[in-house]
Image (cartoon, rainbow, N blue to C red):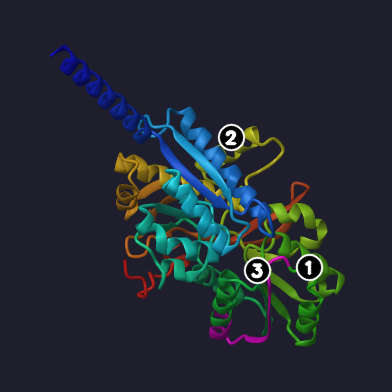
């Protein structure tokens, strides 16, 4: 009898210990960040990391989300789709089933179809390919940033005021680069502009001379650039040497951002482009964010991808809070249709395609208070900047 009671007591204790361990695990919100920490987009991945770290430290300092602390784990994808998928699966297997961090659209396009199978949920803050919230949309994928087709709507408000009729396209030979080129072509054609040259360079291209010469020989009066990170810097520097930047009107998306301006200096002055986020946005929440950022990262202001990633984390946290759960399925359900305040104002998450509905901005690189930086010249309201959901998305 005593032996039976002893075993029963041990079993009960084991059960309580296991239950306690499970409760502790459930109390931790685990976010896996699969991002490009090295390679051509390494700088962009570091921006994502800074923003995620900032957001997590901020929310943990306030006690977490409903008392649950947030934990992160990082994996380097090198911006390569096959590696990104492997690293994301590794994170999920380690219990980090809330994912973010993708830079290249190809990475996100490789991960999104696997989310339900992995029982994971993902917040995209950088990838722009239309298919992510279009034909390839996923019930577990949400996008905080602006897709290419929405950028094109904003570009159209600017392009129709420009006198240049002949345009060239210089893009990254990736899903995003070609998507951006196609979106610009559609917008330009609708405004009776002609595309007279197109070039798409692989990630990590060092010699842009053949592409630049083709643009100069085409008779183009302007060039749309969809390059980012180190590729953007290499192209801009070489384009300046060839005289392209002085001869043509240059505009783009993710091309000249706060971080690349620091490297390019005067080369970037006067370049136009989409500004999806700017530290200069005049909202109380953004001002508070910028001030807090400068304290954590002295001598810096949040750049484009840092602001957009922080925005995505804000809404993700709101979704987790609403779900009152760490279950990816519950979080996805809570995020659908959610409305919440952010650093750029109130935004909503569209149920039809899981796209954030928000405004957009256009401007150019100018000298502001002695510093070159992207300066917003035009603000486009959400009802214009974010066209209706793509019917191809079947959630």
Of the residues under marks 1 and 3, which one precedes in the sequence?
Answer: 1
Q: Quadrant of the C terminus?
A: bottom left
In the picture, the disc for residue 206 is 1
Q: Is residue 356 above or below residue 340?
A: below
Question: Circle 3 sits in a helix, a strand or a loop, which is it?
Answer: strand
**Residue at image coords 53%, 62%:** 107
User: Mark 2–mark 1 contact, CB under 8 Å?
Assistant: no
In the image, taking residue 78 as reference, residue 244 lies left or right, namely right
Disc 1: CA contacts within 10 A as few (<14), some (14-19) or many (>=20): some
User: Mark 3–mark 2 contact, CB under 8 Å?
Assistant: no
In the image, taking residue 202 as reference, residue 112 lies left or right, namely left
Give the residue number, with chain letter if any, for mark 2.
292
Whole-percent x and y of residue 365?
71, 59
Question: Circle 1 sits in a helix, a strand or a loop, which is it?
Answer: loop
Write down the region rendered in magenta: 187-204
Give the residue number, with chain letter if any, for mark 3.
252
Q: Visible in this render: residue 33?
A: yes
Circle nearer the viewer, 1 or 3: 1
In the image, taking residue 395 as reference, residue 210 lies left or right, namely right
In space, the residues marked 3 and 2 are separated at their CA atoms by: 30 Å
């Amino acid at each position: 009898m005593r032996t039976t009671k002893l075993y029963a007591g041990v079993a009960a204790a084991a059960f309580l210990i296991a239950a306690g361990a499970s409760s502790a695990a459930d109390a931790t919100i685990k976010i896996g960040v699969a991002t490009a920490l090295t390679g051509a987009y390494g700088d962009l991945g570091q921006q994502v990391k800074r923003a995620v770290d900032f957001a997590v430290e901020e929310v943990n300092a306030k006690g977490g989300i409903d008392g649950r602390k947030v934990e992160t784990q990082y994996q380097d994808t090198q911006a390569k789709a096959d590696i990104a998928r492997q690293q994301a699966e590794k994170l999920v297997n380690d219990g980090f089933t809330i994912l973010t961090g993708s830079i290249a659209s190809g990475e996100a396009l490789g991960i999104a179809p696997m989310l339900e199978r992995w029982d994971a949920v993902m917040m995209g803050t950088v990838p722009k390919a239309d298919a992510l919230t279009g034909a390839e949309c996923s019930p577990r994928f949400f996008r905080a940033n602006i897709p290419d087709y929405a950028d094109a709507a904003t570009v159209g408000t600017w392009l129709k005021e420009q006198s240049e009729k002949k345009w060239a396209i210089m893009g990254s030979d990736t899903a995003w680069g070609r998507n951006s080129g196609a979106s610009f072509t559609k917008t330009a054609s609708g405004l009776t502009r002609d595309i007279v040259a197109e070039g798409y360079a692989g990630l990590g291209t060092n010699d842009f001379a053949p592409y630049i010469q083709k643009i100069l020989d085409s008779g183009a009066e302007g060039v749309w650039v969809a390059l980012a990170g180190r590729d953007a810097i290499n192209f801009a520097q070489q384009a300046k040497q060839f005289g392209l930047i002085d001869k043509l009107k240059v505009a783009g998306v993710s091309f000249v951002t706060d971080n690349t301006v620091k490297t390019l200096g005067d080369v970037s002055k006067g370049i136009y482009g989409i500004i999806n986020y700017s530290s200069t946005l005049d909202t109380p929440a953004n001002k508070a964010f910028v001030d807090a950022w400068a304290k954590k990262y002295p001598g810096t202001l949040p750049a484009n991808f840092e602001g957009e990633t922080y925005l995505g984390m804000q809404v993700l946290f709101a979704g987790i809070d609403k779900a009152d759960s760490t279950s990816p399925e519950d979080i996805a359900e809570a995020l659908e249709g959610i409305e919440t305040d952010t650093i750029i104002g109130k935004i909503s998450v569209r149920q039809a395609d899981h796209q954030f509905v928000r405004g957009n901005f256009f401007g150019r690189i100018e000298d502001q208070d002695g510093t070159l930086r992207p300066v917003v010249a035009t603000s486009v309201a959400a009802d214009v900047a974010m066209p209706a959901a793509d019917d191809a998305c079947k959630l």
